[in-house]
Amino acid sequence: MTIRTTISKGFGILVASIATLTVVSGAAAQTPERLALADTNGDGNIDWHEVIELRSTTFERLDRNGDGYADSNDSPRFARGRERFNEAFARIEKADRDGDGRVSRSEMLDAPAPLFEKGDVDGDKILSAEELAELRGSIERS
């Protein structure tokens, strides 16, 4: 495997992680299909702990320099990676509660999840397979 292939795959993983994060932190790019990616144990249900786990893992990937914040300092030096990072970061900026231009771990973990909340009709912090199917249907009907 060449260095270029390795770097390209690494950026692909980062972009996929950021896209997944968008599902749980900002309303703009949420879809039930992306929300389903949080089902890490494969039981068909998405519980709040899985959402938090996904956010935590994604934050670790975003915070490339390990300073405790996802921000422009984590952007790759290569133009293609930087462009993807900036596009994805723009989608998660809603989690930046204090408006300092960077997202801390706590901001990331505590960010609202409007699609999850909309789908969790019984309020038990578990999006069941049935609730997810209903959420898909309601979005398709709108």
Image (cartoon, grey):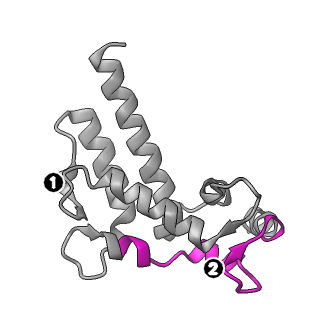
Residue type beneath disc 1: Asn
Q: In the figure, residue 132 lies in which quadrant?
A: bottom right
Quick check: 67 left or right of 91? left
Who's the residue at 38% across and 64% down the image? Answer: 92
**Earlier sequence position, callout 2 versus callout 1:** 1
Quick one: which residue is furthest to the top in this view? Answer: 1
Q: Which residue is mark 1?
A: 73
Q: In the figure, residue 1 lies in which quadrant?
A: top left
Percent across and percent down for residue 51 are: 55, 67
Q: In the figure, residue 68 lies in which quadrant?
A: bottom left
Res 43 visible: yes
Q: Which residue is mark 2?
A: 117
Who's the residue at 23% across and 64% down the image? Answer: 69
Quick one: which residue is furthest to the front in this view? Answer: 41
Between 43 and 74, the one nearer to me in the picture: 43
Percent across and percent down for residue 130 are: 84, 68
In this rendering, is residue 100 above or below 5?
A: below
Q: How many marks?
A: 2
Secondary-structure class at tag 1: helix
Quarter occupied by the C terminus: bottom right
Secondary-structure class at tag 2: helix
Q: CA distance from mark 2 to mark 1?
A: 32 Å
- Residue stretch in magenta: 107-131
